[in-house]
Amino acid sequence: MSSSHLDGFIAELQSAGLPVQVDRPLSTLTTYMVGGTAAVSVTVSALQDLQTLAMITARHQDVPVHVVGRGSNTLISDAGVQGLVVVVSAPANEAVVDLIGDDVVVAGSVTMPVLARRSVKAGRAGLEWCVGIPGSVGGAVRMNAGGHGAEMIDSLQSALVVSLQSGQVVSVPTSDLGMHFRGSALAPHHIVAAAKFKTTSCDVSDGQKEIDAIVAWRREHQPGGRNAGSVFVNPAPGDGSAGALIDSCQLRGFQIGGAQVSEKHANFIQASDGATASDIVAVMSHVQDMVMQQHGVLLRSEVCLLGFDETIMGRFADPRHTDPDRVNASHALGRLMGDVDE
Ligand SMILES: Cc1cc2nc3c(=O)[nH]c(=O)nc-3n(C[C@H](O)[C@H](O)[C@H](O)COP(=O)(O)OP(=O)(O)OC[C@H]3O[C@@H](n4cnc5c(N)ncnc54)[C@H](O)[C@@H]3O)c2cc1C
């Protein structure tokens, strides 16, 4: 990608009225609060702006695109990110949750705790567990986020997806999203603009009690501060949880630079003042090596790595991403979205 081509791309974004930032520092956009800058960044909230953006990116397919929601599952490299970073952000005054019969419809930018609380307040049950996930609905759909015995796939009916490659906007039924444990077939150029969930009716005070219990459980069992939740995906059934494997290697408190395995939860890595993305990756690498040495289990990253070189990406990638069922699901979703290389 030549700099003159990037300049032309930026000029198109600006003339469409989109809020463009060049060399934007990204550290404030993630819960780890580390990492470099984005060559170009646009913050979008309204569907109309997403559509405008998608029409432009579809004409500039050589510009790599990345999406960030609340950044609670993302680690950005110290070198920063080439290409475009799209920040999906909720406007302050958004009418966040719509009720259509038994369905709850919400923008992808809305946070999971807001989804949980607004749904219960409206007398709808089934999404209470979302209060414990500090991410956006869009990020949670892509990750098939879960907790407290539930995950997105259980109640998600469809997602309104914008393709930054084809420029198309498609309502995709859950069965076509290729959702699996902590992942989905959504590509980096797919943005979840909205999601529809099926719910049941509930007594508001019962729902509120459940929410309070989940919040209390999180406070008791998980650390606060700068982290991105569980770093490694739980391995295959029978191999134990990632946290238990790390614990058995006695790695709680293990530290490199400003990054440390949490004393409270072995599968969390905490960042402190002065931490860099390299510190976090160094701790991840050591943990991965120790668990491999002592248990013969390869841990893969649940945290999305952005802007790292192929060695780091390969080291932590999900080895199942080349499984035929996953590849087929990605191709099928690409075709549905009208992506040109499918
Ligand atoms: C303290 C803590 C506890 C956590 N507990 C849990 C837990 O119990 N269970 C769990 O599953 N996760 C947990 N997480 C991880 C995280 O909150 C979830 O994965 C969340 O769904 C990520 O949403 P996000 O908006 O922060 O995504 P980001 O970190 O911004 O992005 C994550 C991925 O989603 C993509 N993405 C973001 N927004 C969109 C969008 N609108 N459309 C399409 N793709 C998008 C990004 O490109 C990236 O691939 C925890 C994190 C923290 C910090």
Image (cartoon, rainbow, N blue to C red):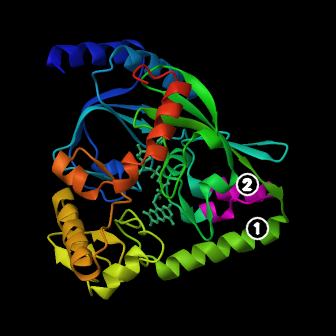
Above or below: residue 273 compared with residue 223: above
Above or below: residue 96 compared with residue 30: above
Q: Which residue is at 36% across, 18% downward?
A: 13
The reply to whether the magenta stretch includes residue 277 is: no
Residue 283 seen by the camera = yes
Which residue type carries mark 2? Ser
Instruction: Check the picture and name the quadrant holding the N terminus.
Output: top left
Whole-angstrom CA distance, mark 2 to mark 1, is 9 Å
Q: Quadrant of residue 94?
A: top right
Q: Secondary structure at mark 2?
A: helix
| Residue 119, numbered label | 2
Q: Quadrant of residue 270?
A: bottom left
Q: Which residues are magenta?
A: 114-130
Residue 39 seen by the camera = no
Q: Which residue is at 20% across, 72% downward?
A: 289
Q: Which residue is at 60% across, 27% downward?
A: 170
Which residue type carries mark 1? Gly
Please tell me whether the stretch drawn in magenta is mainly helix, strand or loop.
helix
Q: Secondary structure at mark 1?
A: helix
Give the x, y percent position of residue 167: 48, 19
Report crowding for label 2: few under 14, some 14 to 19, many 20 or more residues within 10 A (C-alpha): many
List the residue tagged with mark 1: 207
Q: Are marks 2 and 1 in contact (CB under 8 Å)?
A: yes
